[in-house]
Amino acid sequence: QLQLVESGGGLVQPGGSLRLSCAAPGVILDNYAIGWFRQAPGKEREGVSCISVTRGTDYAEAVKGRFRTQRGSAKNTVYLQMNSLKPEDTAVYYCAANWNPRSPICTMLPTYAYWGKGTQVTVSS
């Protein structure tokens, strides 16, 4: 059973930045596609970004140009760098993983097998 732990959330002012981490203690994530999702109060969970095993990435239109997903050098962590944050980015952010060693693509659909418990991001002045 793969365990994922998100961290790095918090309160930030509009226009600020945060970097979220998705860690898998003791597991190398190189063969897993990783997705980032968020869920705001009263709304459905939505895909934000994803990264494939070949480091291809995809982003939701709402975050393109502001968010960036990348794999860490430690190989057991994936990051979501969030810049120019807006109040509408406020949500609980989740990372998710699928074993997918041969696929060059990733998906922002919530079809992942493994999920973290989430980290709260609040953008407010």
Image: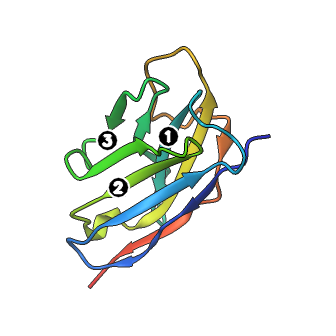
Quadrant in the picture for the C terminus: bottom left
Q: Position of residue 122 (x, y in %)?
A: 40, 74
Name the residue beneath numbered marker 3. 60
37 up-or-down from 102: above or below: below
Q: CA distance from mark 3 to mark 2?
A: 14 Å
Q: Residues within 10 Å of mark 2 (few under 14, many from 20)?
A: some
Give the camera-side residue of 90 and 119. 119
Q: Position of residue 106 (x, y in %)?
A: 46, 27
Q: How is the image coloured?
A: rainbow
Q: Dot 2 lies on which element?
A: strand
What residue appears at the point 44 percent right and 35 percent down from the top-left corner? 108
Q: Quadrant of residue 49?
A: top left
Quadrant in the picture for the N terminus: top right
Q: Dot 1 lies on which element?
A: strand
> Which circle's residue, 2 or 1, is located before the other in the chain?
1
Q: Dot 3 lies on which element?
A: loop
Q: Position of residue 98 (x, y in %)?
A: 62, 31
> Which circle's residue, 3 or 1, is located before the other in the chain?
1
Give the camera-side residue of 14 and 69. 69
Q: How many marks?
A: 3
Q: Amino acid at mark 1?
A: Gly
Q: Amino acid at mark 2?
A: Gln
Q: What label sits on residue 81 in the rendered view?
A: 2
Name the residue beneath numbered marker 1. 35
What residue appears at the point 25 percent right and 49 percent down from the top-left corner? 62
Q: Amino acid at mark 3?
A: Ala
Mark 3 or mark 2, whichever is nearer to me: 2
Q: Position of residue 65 (x, y in %)?
A: 19, 47
What residue appears at the point 21 percent right and 63 percent down from the top-left corner? 84
